Amino acid sequence: MSTLTVANLYAGYGDVDIVTDLSLRVEPLEIVTIAGTNGSGKSTLVKGLMGLLKRIRGRVDFEGTSLLGVPGERRIHMGIAYVPQVNNVFASLTVLENLQVVEGVSDRRRRMAEMLDRFPALQERRSTKAGALSGGERQQLAFARALMASPRLMILDEPTAALSPALVHEVLRLITALRGMGVAVLLVEQRARQALAISDRGYILDSGRVVIEDRADRLLADERMADLYLGEH
């Protein structure tokens, strides 16, 4: 059974569909990248998957259960984690407080200890307010928060945005490690080439539609397609 199945999805704002007739899937423990130029519908897709849009129709199933009509917070309790591009931590709270306020966590103290062990930089900064963390530390905290509830699918929206090249490499390493934690990943990323390099498969969006779907290595090997949709080397 697929972890995530999306079929014939339409989503948008007001009376306008931005995403049209879109289908995709994420298998257990897969890393799948969604790429495309600005305005291709990537952000609308993510909001639709997380229940943040009123205008949506089609099929969205998580492990065989329909998500349509399910509130966003309930999706988190079902096993879906979401790390948005911005506002992914509480800047006014400390690292520990950011982990403490995550809902739907059994044995919270044990789980917090596991997250601090997994992200040593956070252990050292556990009493520091999130707003004072470096960009890389903030992303580690965002990942730790998302992992607190033991998800089986994580949806990441532009996790490397505004990071230095060195920090981009670190975040991609963290994403790769999620597979070993039993988590499948749907990754929306502007740095498409680097994202595809750590992915199993990829989908290229254009004007709200999937125009190409293939294994990640094949997408990267097609130079003409890559230059058109992924940017020049």
Image (cartoon, helix red, strand yellow):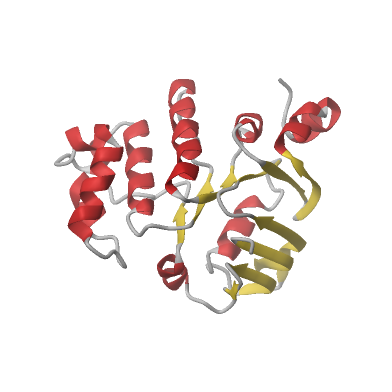
Looking at the image, the residue that sits furthest to the left is 127
* Residue farthest to the right, as pictured: 224
101 horizontally vs 180: left or right: left
Q: As rendered, which of 32 and 126 lies closer to the eye?
A: 32
Q: Is residue 215 visible from the viewing direction of this image?
A: yes
Q: Tell me the quarter of the image containing the N terminus.
A: bottom right
Give the residue at x 35% y 59%: 149
Q: Position of residue 124 (x, y in %)?
A: 18, 33
Q: Residue at x 36, y 46 (%)?
A: 142
Residue 119: x and y in percent read 30, 37
Position of residue 131 measured from the top left corner of the image (x, y, whole percent): 26, 41
Task: Tell me if 148 is positioned left or right of 178 in this view.
Answer: left
Q: Position of residue 24 (x, y in %)?
A: 71, 57
- How many dots with numbers? 0
User: Which residue occupies 59% across, 40% down?
Assistant: 189
Please determine whether, in this image, residue 21 is positioned above or below residue 35: below
Q: Quadrant of residue 174?
A: top left
Q: Is residue 59 above or below residue 222?
A: below
Residue plotted at (45% across, 64% down)? 79
